Amino acid sequence: MGVRFYKEPKLNNPILVACWPGIGNIGVIAVDILRRAMAAEEFGEIESWEFFYPRRVLIRNGELKDLEFPSNKFYFKKTGKRDVLFFIGEEQPADGAKVYAEGAKAYRMANLVIDVALKFGCRRVYTSGAAVAPIHHTARSRVWVVPNSEDLIGELKSYENTILMSDIEGRDGQGNITGLNGLLLGVAGKRGLEAICVMGEVPIYIHGFPIPYPKGSKSVLEVLSTALGIEVPMDEINALVQQSESEIDSVYERLPAEIKEQLDKLKYVTYAKPSEPEPITEEDKKRILQEIDRLFKKEPGGD
Amino acid sequence: MRESHSLRLFNKPKLESSALVVAWNQDVGKVGSIAVDYLNRKLESREFAEIEPEGFFPLGGVSVEDDVARFPQSKFYWCPEKSLVIFKSDIPRYEWYEFLNLVLDVAEKYCKVKEVYAVGGMVSAAAHTVPRMLLSVVNSTEMKRMLSHHELVSDMDYETQDDQRPTFSSFLIWAAKRRNIAGASLWVTIPFYLVAVEDQQSCKKLIEFFDRRLGLNVDFVDMDEEIAKQNKEIAQLRSKFPELDAYISKLEGNLSLTVEESEKLVREIEQLLKNRHLG
């Protein structure tokens, strides 16, 4: 049970960048672009059948040829400096209707990923996900950063466009990171590795919909490329951002004027500091989400 | 592996080389479970083990089906004289691979199973007067060769569609292959208007396969009586209601029905045959 390796590369003090899908697929989009930009090579995978129900069967001439499970793959790239390992999971192992992993299965998978990190000499892990925030979709997403050790805070502050939980008004440095992108931070710490979760902001009125939010991914990609010291071409992510923004705009334009007016307030909200004008109320938020939900449901192929 | 925790073993069967037949309670038309119940009864099988539901099924209450509270069951039976092992179970909701491994552990360790079969039903647009077909999906070329003397439709091409998932039977024979156990899933056709009323003819088709394959010498007398009775009742319905007769005749002529016609046929047949069972 566990991990199957196709090869065992010799790596120099590598950093692991790990990611599973979540809100807006923010982390997976960013990490996958980074992996492809670096031309990282696949070298192993977690044996997924222990964690997932199969999602596809291939039968040819009456013979079962293949049963396909969600993939959970490892990649590596030798850079000449600190090498990089990637782990990208296609799905979080969840029981029943839950979307995010929790419990024994999630813990087992997180430990398998850390097993691989330790086997290849990693001392640092990055994970990535989404941070739901009261921002407007025309604004640049910032990146919430959460380390598993106080020693890393100084370094994280030095990255452009990042904020800590304590920078966010009303949070007092507290919060939760749901699913494996969060759990891995804890497991890494327990096993002696430093780890950082970088989360791209997604507007509060969009996070509940099953659509990607590449703008958040772009901000994550910028932080990761700085942290790893790697230059990444931004053409692909810029094209995704442009396409997503025009799709969101087209829905936005069809919102009732009253709802749009409320959401437009978010353009002026700087929620990390005292806000002016007043942000939307909880009641407004509920109404707005219902209205947007209605609009998305009208969109052809909108799920 | 948590065999000791999840498995309750009452007896250790004495088998040297046997076949395992697996039926799921959540099966189209319940043909698989009816077929293994019939085999258990006719062959006087003995229950020898069961898998505890904890960890595999949600245990926040019970489901109610057909007015009766149901609790998940996963039981093993064996037929001492016939080298046959039967596993009848609900499909687990969690830890699928672990569950299947537990089934295969029991099969290998206590029953020396060499062949695994999963049985189930497949809805067909054909009329009930058309002979049932038995389709097979095997987990190896060797198994295909072994079954080549049986009357099976064994040339199926299939790929899961985006909104579907593979069957649990596919998962079972895939897991069997990982242990080098020959496996096949068998799918018997059921006329769509008999899905809700226990189509004995489909069940017989399944049992006939095992009768020949495993030399079981099953006595089909009571099942034949049931089939004859059902056919007679449908024939009476056809003569009484020309509209339904026309629908079935269309199916017999390889023509398709409209949605409304299909629904009416299902409704009328279901009503007739269910009333009979109640009476």
Image (cartoon, coloured by chain):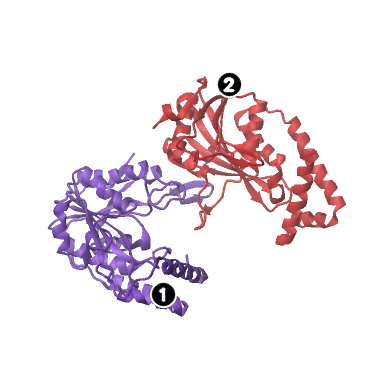
Chain colours: A purple, B red
Left or right relative to B57: residue A82: left
* Residue A221: x %, y % from top left: 25, 65
Frontmost residue, B274 versus B193: B274
Q: Of tags 1 and 2, which is closer to the observer?
A: 1
Q: Which mark is residue A247?
A: 1
Could one spot residue B191 in this view of the protein?
yes
Residue labelled with disc 2: B80
Frontmost residue, B176 versus A145: A145
Left or right relative to A267: residue A125: left
Residue appearing at x 67%, y 38% in the figure: B203
Distance, label 1 to label 2, CA atoms, is 67 Å
Chain ID at mark 2: B
Quarter occupied by the N terminus of chain B: top left
* Location of residue B95 by image quarter: top left
Q: Examine the rendered structure and indicate whether residue A108 appears above or below residue A133.
A: above
Q: Amino acid at mark 2?
A: Pro
* Residue B167: x %, y % from top left: 52, 46
Q: Examine the rendered structure and indicate whether residue A18 appears above or below residue A4.
A: below
Residue furthest out toward the right: B240
Total numbered labels placed on residues in the image: 2
* Residue A223: x %, y % from top left: 21, 64
Q: Amino acid at mark 1?
A: Glu
